[in-house]
Amino acid sequence: MPPQNIVILGTGGTIAGRAASASDNIGYTAAQVGVEELLAAIPALAQAGTVLTEQVAQLDSKDMTFAVWARLAARVSHYLAQPDIQGIVITHGTDTLEETAFFLQALLAPAKPVVLTCAMRPATALVPDGPQNLLDAVAVARHVGAQGVVAVCAGVIHGAADVQKVHTYRLDPFSSGDAGPTGYVEEGKLRLVRNWPQSQSDRAPAAKIIASLAGPGAVPRVEIIMNHAGAGGAIVQALRAQGIQGLVVAGTGNGSLHKELEAALLAAQAAGVKVIRASRCFSGRVLSTPADTIPDSQGLSAVKARISLILQLLA
């Protein structure tokens, strides 16, 4: 059996950030430290077996694009196909980590572990959290039987379909809501409480979508709007005028919609725009009734429903 290696792909984020002062945890510039430099600061990783690195991107994750996702998915797909690669770790910013994780799981559903990790403090902080998160992520990637795309932060393992950033500042900013975490990393060992994300062996559709994403103007335009008191249909009408292909609406409560907004969405749907109804609530999911005229998001948050709809339109 060939030696089992881990690949760490860098994309930037706070984990690679720098600030002028070690006491400054928020006034930093993200995506300044390369992935090799990050690893050099963690001697314990040298004891974790062979680790390969590649800098796929270097950006603040608030600026994540489909072009970067296409490049990242292509590299992840490449390494997944290598028999000597046991798992992949991706360093990422926290702001859009949940979207990247869901995109990769929905597209690739890998039989090997793909682990996204991050930090809430920059690499220059007096007590940075990135090194421990990276160590934990490698431990997950090396775990026998691990599969699918997960996120690891503050010792907690979250599945890609459930993870959401729910806090602006604390070191443990993620939650898996009602579903709960997949497990925990405790002193380098895993304690699992749920199954790993499901995998699939056929990556042919993924390869086709990755190739199409690399082309100019290839991504269908799908936007997110929110229901709120006094919500009207003007935004929907403006987006239709721009040739929108899909809309995800974050409804109130159980996906409820203001009557004016709902009328505009139904008109868009009748005109061929794909419309999906999610909820702006953090926990729970939209429960549809036979009388509902706009399909629900199947439990996905608005941002993940958007990604799912884009992949559907591409396919």
Image (cartoon, rainbow, N blue to C red):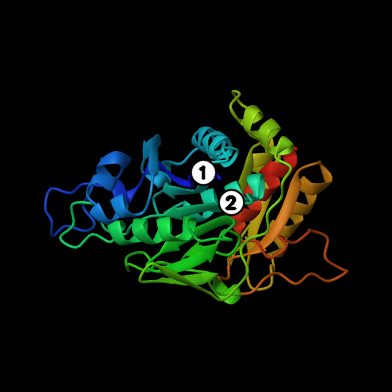
Residue 175, percent from left and from top: 49, 70
Q: Position of residue 207 (x, y in %)?
A: 67, 33
Name the amino acid type tagged 2: Lys
In the rendered view, tell whether residue 189 sits above or below residue 63.
below
User: Given the current orientation, which residue lies at the most extreme front position?
Assistant: 1
- Please give the label number shown on residue 85: 1
| Residue 106 coordinates in the image, percent (x, y) | 65, 50
Residue farthest toward the right in the current orientation of the protein: 290
- The residue carrying mark 2 is 112
Q: Where the C terminus falls, by quadrant?
A: top right
Give whichever of 140, 159 is nearer the camera.
140
Question: With respect to residue 310, does 150 lie above or below?
Answer: below
- Label 1 vs label 2, nearer the camera: 1
| Upstream in sequence: badge 1 or badge 2 | 1
Q: Which residue is found at the position 69% from the left and 67% from the top?
A: 255
Q: Check whether the beta carbons of the residues at disc 1 and disc 2 lie within 8 A of each other.
A: yes
- Amino acid on which the number 1 mark rests in the picture: Ile
Q: Residues within 10 Å of mark 1 (few under 14, many from 20)?
A: many
Residue nearer the viewer, 189 or 255: 189
Q: Report helix, strand or loop for mark 2.
A: loop
Q: SS class of the residue under badge 1?
A: strand
